[in-house]
Image (cartoon, coloured by chain):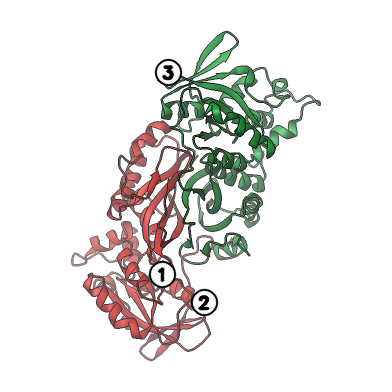
Chain colours: A red, B green
């Protein structure tokens, strides 16, 4: 594989953003930010055999997901993604076609948002693929949705459904029931090609006070982060948590997926009760599923409580922690 | 190693940039760009056993260099670095102290430029360390130094000395003469902790038409990129190429290091003859070494020619190409 040939192959033939001054082809890229906006930046890495496997996902799907998880972080701030940079460490003897397919997967998603690939690096490694994506987005000044502004009485909500990605992974690992009547394709798709909730995030950022996280490490983990940052207690109702109707058919422990599974990349957060109806209406108008799942309580314990009929359980993060031995 | 503990350890206690709205601690970072500036962005990856070895460099030095090579790309545009994001893939059973030392090495360099660490990711990998750094800088609107504006008659220059980094690597690999009289510490330092030429880049961007590259892949490669982008021929004089006086003592093939060694992270480029004197004076005033090494010729062959007394040689890129088998 020749680095220069590969770069030629993956360099975009055209760009979308008019604010881009110089894309790939110099030492760094240059763009003109919008004067009424703030810039939003994040980076995420996916490692072969840790975050993805080629017997589960195609290179196209891996590329798609590598960008999706980053766009989801921009969505969780209420921002609009604009640019991305990609760095790939490539094992010996790998086919250029695999690397090109990563970029095609990313481009398929990027084009939906008129995002431009504006930089990157391709290097050799002795073993597994490592894909690092940086995404730059923007948001109107002062509109970003942080974690620290939840207040007593706020509604707790989630966009989309929970637990689907974990169910998809369990299907890939042959751990669950796969009767004919179950829509397995739905769960597999959610795991392999998650859809970032940019449109929902944009609605959130149009309201004056919304806290927001994307569900990457699991609902319990995300709500704990909001509870900690805002110093509030969050109560959610087990029977309100949105899930695909087939989810409980797959495994009796399906609630674990809903609470701790993660990688759903839906958004969860809080909004004042007085804004809830208008928020719900706007989401419906744009065909965005949004579900009220609980309330912020007047208690500075920074905890998350799951109510299941008469039972109350404190939910710990239990999110995926890469280094836990 | 616990990911959350590690993140706590590496999260900055204070920040420098007043335009930073939200640093590490939410889904993405948010900053307010300066309205008279353009944003400059780049990313670079260093892989253990490919780009660095722990028997050659300490983790502190590896971290320093990982950031330095990125800041150098900002310098090569004439920009000022502001923010950086770091993603590290960590092999099993590695000590948290090693990872912390990477970040300390980066911070030592970042603090010089009042740069803030605003994001990142720490993930597990099965084998070697992979460090990816993204740097965001800024530059006054329209002032960036690209590669495509060289014109006939321009002076070709280089800041600093060439070949020192390659000499340092050869010293580490015990390939060269190491007589007592040779300043080996100088060469080792240049290889292990290269200094990006931000101040020189800033002077370049204050002139109306400068082409600029940083010498990462070797002088021949960088000048070929300028010659191609600008469609000009560049002639350089072998006896003008700046080098440390001890360089020729190390190895008889020292000119190879000067032309093709790379990783010097000095800047090379072109400037109109009419601006040269003023440029040279400004560099001197700021104690920046700048050397005139050749001229741009009226010829659209997009090539680089080395003149050595009566002899003329066409210089090909021969830069380091990670995938060449």
B27 relative to B107, above or below: below
Q: Nearer the viewer, residue A142 or B263?
A: A142
- Based on the displayed image, in which of its 4 quarters is residue A96 positioned? top left
Q: Position of residue A166 (x, y in %)?
A: 35, 65
**What's the mark number on residue A143?**
1
CA–CA distance between discs 2 and 1?
A: 21 Å
Q: Which residue is mark 2?
A: A228
Q: Nearer the viewer, residue B305 or B104?
A: B305
Q: Is residue B222 left or right of residue B290?
A: left
Nearer to us: label 1 or label 3: 3
Q: Residues within 10 Å of mark 1 (few under 14, many from 20)?
A: many
Please state the chain letter of the residue tagged with numbered disc 1 in the rendered image. Answer: A
A272 relative to A66, above or below: below
Please state the chain letter of the residue tagged with numbered disc 2 in the rendered image. Answer: A
Tell which circle, 2 or 1, labels the residue nearer the N-terminal end.
Answer: 1
CA–CA distance between discs 2 and 3?
A: 66 Å
A102 relative to A294, above or below: above
For numbered disc 2, what is the local secondary structure?
Answer: helix
CA–CA distance between discs 1 and 3?
A: 54 Å
Labels 2 and 3 positioned on one and the same chain: no
Q: Position of residue A59 (x, y in %)?
A: 33, 46
């Amino acid at each position: 594989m020749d680095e220069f040939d590969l770069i030629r192959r993956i360099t975009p033939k055209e760009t979308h953003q008019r604010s881009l001054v110089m894309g790939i082809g110099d030492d760094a890229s240059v763009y003109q930010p919008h004067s009424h906006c703030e810039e939003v930046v994040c980076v995420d890495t996916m490692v072969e055999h840790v975050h993805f496997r080629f017997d589960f996902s195609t290179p196209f799907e891996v590329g798609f997901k590598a960008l999706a998880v980053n766009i989801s972080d921009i969505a969780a701030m209420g921002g609009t993604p604009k640019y991305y940079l990609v760095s790939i460490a490539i094992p010996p003897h790998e086919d250029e076609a695999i690397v090109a397919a990563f970029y095609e997967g990313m481009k398929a998603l990027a084009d939906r948002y008129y995002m431009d690939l504006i930089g990157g690096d391709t290097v050799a490694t002795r073993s597994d693929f490592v894909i690092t994506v940086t995404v730059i987005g923007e948001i109107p000044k002062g509109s970003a949705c942080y974690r620290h502004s939840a207040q007593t009485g706020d509604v707790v909500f989630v966009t989309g459904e929970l637990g689907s990605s974990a169910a998809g992974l369990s299907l890939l690992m042959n751990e669950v029931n796969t009767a004919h009547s179950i829509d397995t394709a739905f769960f597999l798709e959610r795991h392999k090609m998650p859809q970032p909730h940019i449109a929902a995030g944009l609605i959130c950022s149009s309201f004056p006070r919304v806290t927001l996280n994307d569900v990457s490490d699991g609902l319990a983990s995300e709500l704990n982060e909001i509870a900690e940052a805002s110093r509030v207690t969050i109560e959610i109702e087990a029977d309100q948590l949105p899930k695909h109707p087939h989810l409980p058919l797959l495994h009796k422990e399906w609630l674990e997926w809903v609470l701790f599974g993660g990688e759903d990349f839906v958004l969860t957060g809080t909004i004042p009760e007085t804004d809830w109806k208008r928020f719900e209406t706007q989401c419906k108008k744009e065909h965005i599923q949004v579900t009220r799942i609980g309330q912020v309580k007047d208690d500075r314990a920074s905890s998350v409580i799951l109510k299941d009929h008469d039972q109350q359980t404190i939910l710990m993060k239990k999110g995926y922690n890469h280094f836990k031995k």
